[in-house]
Image (cartoon, rainbow, N blue to C red):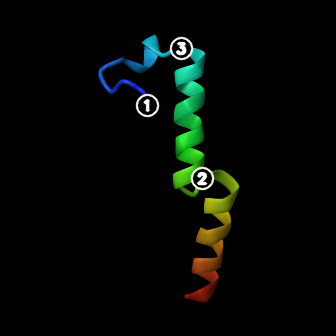
């Protein structure tokens, strides 16, 4: 867990890596998101 009360500028490298890991595991980002959006547009 990452402490929610710590400001981003005060994160350690480990905390930043953990946040990146959580985001990439739980949300579609970058290429995967772009591909999904393009497919959705083509379906319209």
Q: How many other residues sit within 10 Å of disc 2, few (<14), some (14-19) or many (≥20)? A: few
Residue topped by disc 1: 1
Q: Position of residue 18 (x, y in %)?
A: 56, 31
- Give above or below for 32 relative to 30: below
Residue positioned 43% across, 20% down in the render: 8
The span from disc 1 to disc 2 (Cα, nearest Å) is 21 Å
Q: Position of residue 12 (x, y in %)?
A: 53, 14
Q: Residues within 10 Å of mark 3 (few under 14, many from 20)?
A: few
Question: Of all residues shown, which one is farthest toward the bottom?
Answer: 44
Above or below, 26 against 6 in this view is below
Please name which of the two marks, 2 or 3, marks the residue nearer to the observer.
Answer: 3
Local secondary structure at mark 1? loop
Residue on which the image places disc 3:
12
What residue is disc 2 on?
29
Report the quarter where the N terminus lies.
top left
Quarter containing the C terminus:
bottom right
Q: Position of residue 11 (x, y in %)?
A: 48, 16
Secondary element at image label 3: loop
Q: Residue at x 53, y 42 (%)?
A: 22
Mark 1 or 2, closer to the camera: 1
Residue in the foreground of this view, choosing between 7 and 38: 7
CB under 8 Å between callouts 1 and 3? Answer: no
Taking the image as shown, residue 2 lies to the left or right of residue 20, namely: left
Q: Label 1 vs label 3: CA separation?
A: 13 Å
């Amino acid at each position: 867990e990452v402490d929610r009360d710590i400001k981003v500028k005060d994160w350690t490298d480990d905390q930043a890596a953990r946040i990146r890991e959580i985001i990439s595991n739980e949300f579609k980002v970058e290429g995967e998101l772009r591909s999904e959006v393009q497919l959705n547009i083509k379906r319209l």
